[in-house]
Amino acid sequence: MRVWLPPLVLAGLLFSTAAAAQPDKERAKLRGELAALEKQVWDAWVRQDADALKNLLAEDYQEIGSPAGPHVARAQALESLANLRIFKYDVDNLELLSLSKDAALLTYRATVVGSFRGQNLSPGRYNVSSAWVNRDGKWLSALRQWTPLEPEKEPPPPTIEAFDLTVGPNSLLYTYKGPAPLEDVRISLTILFPIGRVGNIDRYWATWQPGDVKAIDLTFLARGINEIERIELSGTATMGGKKVLLGAVSRRQK
């Protein structure tokens, strides 16, 4: 069904749509302009170009949490340039927050490879907030805050506990019940007795297939196998090309 709108109503809708789009275009333009200026600051650091920085930093410029110190003013930022080496940087997730017609804030994540006074920049990843102000028609950098990002921690490898233990007359028989083959298997056994323990019983197997039984000879035990109270198996292996941990605890049935 077609809906007919009077010409004046239609014109009003078109005008409202155009008016709403105008701020978005202006915001995108400002974002591009300030992003380019922010890049100039980074490039000046890379080149150790003090003259370029002087042209970009406001007289009351402040820097918080930077490699040069926890709170650095413009003069200190320029002086520290001789000790700053930035070999490579990358910026992503850049966003613009317009504060007023003459002030705006850029936020982004920076990954930096470099050093300050001979010490590597650590952790090398930062959330950066960069404030820019328009003074006499020129945008200047007024504040920059660096928030270090801790290195992302990899989750620990999964632990495989699918082992059945059968105690023979002079050996331990471990049956692997897992879902997939294990490779590069390295295990260590600790055996506990009522009055002591024996550890560092190490074994290596290139592969361990599901259902296979591995025998560990215990004829060397002076106390004999019947006095064992607890057996702890630990180790590492790879499953499907990924590292896994191995773990199993067996107690004597009373």
Image (cartoon, rainbow, N blue to C red):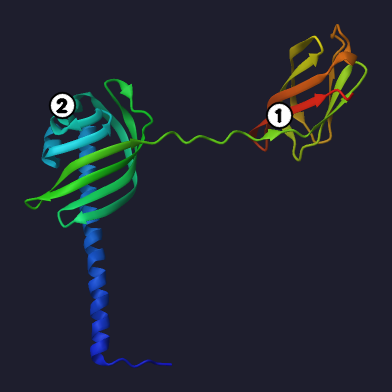
Left or right: 134 as drawn, with respect to 127: left
Name the residue that disc number 1 marks. 246
| Residue drawn at (19%, 28%) of the image | 81
Where does the image place residue 182, in percent across and percent down from the top left? 73, 32
Q: Is residue 60 left or right of residue 144?
A: left
Graded by Cα atoms within 10 Å as few (under 14), some (14 to 19) or many (20 or more), the crowding at tag 1 reads many
- One can see residue 48 in this view: no
Q: Quadrant of residue 128?
A: top left
**Residue wearing tag 2:** 79
Decide: is 124 above or below 36: above
- Secondary structure under the numbered disc 2 in the rendered image: helix
Q: Which callout, 2 or 1, points at the residue further toward the start of the chain? A: 2
For the N terminus, the quadrant is bottom left
Whether 249 is drawn above or below 194: the answer is: below
**Marks 2 and 1: CB-CB under 8 Å?**
no
Q: Quadrant of the C terminus?
A: top right
Viewer-closest of 132 and 86: 132
Residue furthest top as drawn: 222
Q: Amino acid at mark 2?
A: Glu
| Badge 1 amino acid | Leu
Q: Which residue is pictured at 33% across the width and 37% down the height?
A: 147
Looking at this view, is 46 or 104 the one in front? 104
- Rendering coords of residue 238 (x, y %): 67, 32
Tell me what residue is drawn at x 34 percent, y 93 percent: 4
How far apart marks 2 and 1 lie (CA) works out to 55 Å
Is the residue 181 above or below the residue 167 in the image? below
